[in-house]
Image (cartoon, rainbow, N blue to C red):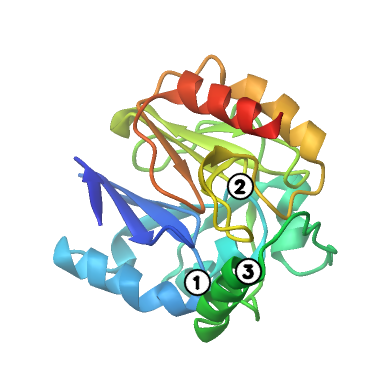
Amino acid sequence: MRLDQNLYRIGNDIVAAYLVVTDEGVTLVDAGIPGQWSELLAQLSELGLGPTDVRGVVLTHGDGDHIGYAERLRSEFGVPVYIHAADAARARGEVKVKPNWGKFRIGATAGFLWYAGRRGGLNPVYLKEVKEIADGDVLDLPGRPRIVSLPGHSPGSVAVHVPAVDAVFVGDGLTTRHVLTGSHGPQPAPFTDDPSGALDSLDRLAGIEATWVLPGHGTPWNQGVQEIVRQVRAAAR
């Protein structure tokens, strides 16, 4: 799904990953769930590209619904996978985390689990090898993504700022569709390790100028960083 020039979404409002497409190749931000692999291939093919054009995968954190097909890209096509050092063990499956479910509605939760389950999302394919990154790093990848630490959802959660496409990718630092309640609009994300810490981390987005704010779950946002942060804080109250 084309969002803007050189900016594409793989997946949907339930689970999403994103492509930054440049003349130098493609940067993939997050990797959804394993069963969305065919959607990645279809979008690349539509652009006249293939998996070998992906120069790197940048993970916003190490949860199973974000690492998706990253190991397949790494092992079959030699694509490096980048993740914050604090979430590296999580992405390799070495750390098991008991999810913080919080509020949920049976219908919405069942729909999320049905969608994810049919596409391998309940059986994550962990990474065997990752490249560790840190706050402030600017990666030598298409679009020159800059890493902004956003601890809270997980210790190594990050935002990925790509000025070349006027976008910041926030993973589960916030959401615009709560997969467990079905409620729409900017709000805190579910399954968050440290909810208060995640809200505090939104301050780290304050200095970022970007039209697009792109979460791992929910409708893409194109009304700027400051407004979505304001609405998330209001929803938290």
Which element is circle 2 on?
loop
Q: Which residue in the protein does label 3 denote?
A: 109
Amino acid type at mark 3: Thr
Residue 191: image quadrant is bottom right
Nearest-to-viewer mark from 1 and 3: 3
Q: Are marks 1 and 3 in contact (CB under 8 Å)?
A: no
Say few, some or many: other residues with alpha carbon within 10 Å of mark 2 (under 14 / 14 to 19 / 20 or more): many
Q: Callout 1: helix, strand or loop? A: loop
Closer to us: mark 2 or mark 1?
2
Q: CA distance from mark 3 to mark 2?
A: 17 Å
Q: Do callouts 2 and 1 mark residues in contact (Cβ within 8 Å)? A: no
Is residue 25 visible to us here?
Answer: no
- Choose between 186 and 208: the one closer to the eye: 186
Q: Earlier in the sequence, mark 1 or mark 3?
A: 1
| Tag of residue 172 | 2
Q: Is residue 19 left or right of residue 204?
A: left
145 to 79, vertically: above or below: above
The residue wearing badge 1 is: 69
Residue 12: horizontal and vertical position, in percent?
39, 61
